[in-house]
């Protein structure tokens, strides 16, 4: 019998959401979901060092470096040397990158709204439950980090 635990279903749901988002973004915005998330985190963080961006994304520094080259070439972000620390590189989203994030968010939000309507799920209730789960997870991770330095 297939596993239908809540944890399993949630994992499958998130996997399918990610896969669907990737297809939609590539077809309608011209960017992969991974790159979209990268730009979304950068927009949220503001100008940061390359290493700070790697930490925020939970990516390795070399993986971020590779992505920076690709996204800078496409005009979605700008990389400059830090005036205070010459070896550090500062990363900033460009207006073009911000536009890609805005278009992608609008697309994905509309698709998710349609999915919730199809499933008969109330938006605010799902938001509240998701926020409680997220906050509990963050709290649990912080506690674990304090206990295991």
Image (cartoon, rainbow, N blue to C red):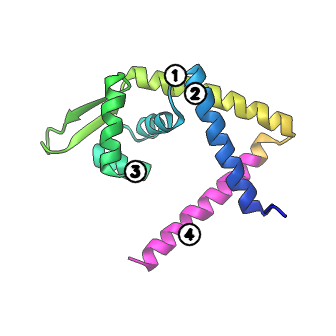
The residue identified by callout 1 is 30
Asked whether 83 or 12 is in front, the reply is 12
- Disc 3 and disc 1 in contact, CB within 8 angstroms: no
Please tell me the numbered disc located at residue 140: 4
- Residue 48 visible somewhere in the drawing: no
The residue identified by callout 2 is 25
Label 1 crowd bin: few (<14), some (14–19), many (20+), radius 10 Å? some
Where is residue 24 drawn, in percent x and y?
63, 27
Q: Disc 3 or 2, which lies upstream in sequence?
A: 2
The residue identified by callout 3 is 59
Q: Residue reaching furthest front? A: 1
Q: CA distance from mark 1 to mark 2?
A: 6 Å
Q: Quadrant of residue 68?
A: top left
Q: Which SS class for mark 4?
A: helix
Where is residue 104 drawn, in percent x and y?
56, 27
* Residue ID at (48%, 21%): 99
Q: CA distance from mark 3 to mark 1?
A: 23 Å
Q: CA distance from mark 1 to mark 4?
A: 37 Å
Q: Which SS class for mark 1?
A: loop
Q: Disc 2 or 4, which lies upstream in sequence?
A: 2
Circle 4 or circle 3, nearest the eye:
3
- Disc 1 and disc 2 in contact, CB within 8 angstroms: yes
Q: CA distance from mark 2 to mark 4?
A: 33 Å
* Residue ID at (32%, 27%): 72
- Identify the magenta region: 126-149
């Amino acid at each position: 019998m297939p596993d239908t635990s809540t944890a399993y279903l949630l994992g499958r749901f998130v996997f399918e959401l990610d896969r669907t988002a990737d297809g939609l973004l590539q077809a309608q915005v011209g960017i992969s979901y991974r790159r979209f998330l990268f730009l979304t985190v950068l927009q949220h963080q503001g100008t940061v060092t390359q290493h700070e961006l790697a930490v925020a994304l939970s990516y390795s520094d070399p993986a971020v470096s590779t992505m920076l080259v690709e996204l800078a070439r496409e005009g979605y972000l700008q990389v400059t040397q830090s005036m205070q620390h010459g070896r550090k590189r500062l990363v900033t989203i460009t207006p073009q990158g911000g536009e890609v994030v805005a278009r992608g968010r609008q697309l994905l939000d509309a698709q998710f709204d349609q999915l919730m309507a199809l499933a008969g799920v109330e938006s605010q209730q799902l938001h509240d439950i998701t926020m409680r789960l997220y906050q509990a997870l963050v709290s649990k991770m912080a506690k674990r980090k304090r206990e295991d330095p």
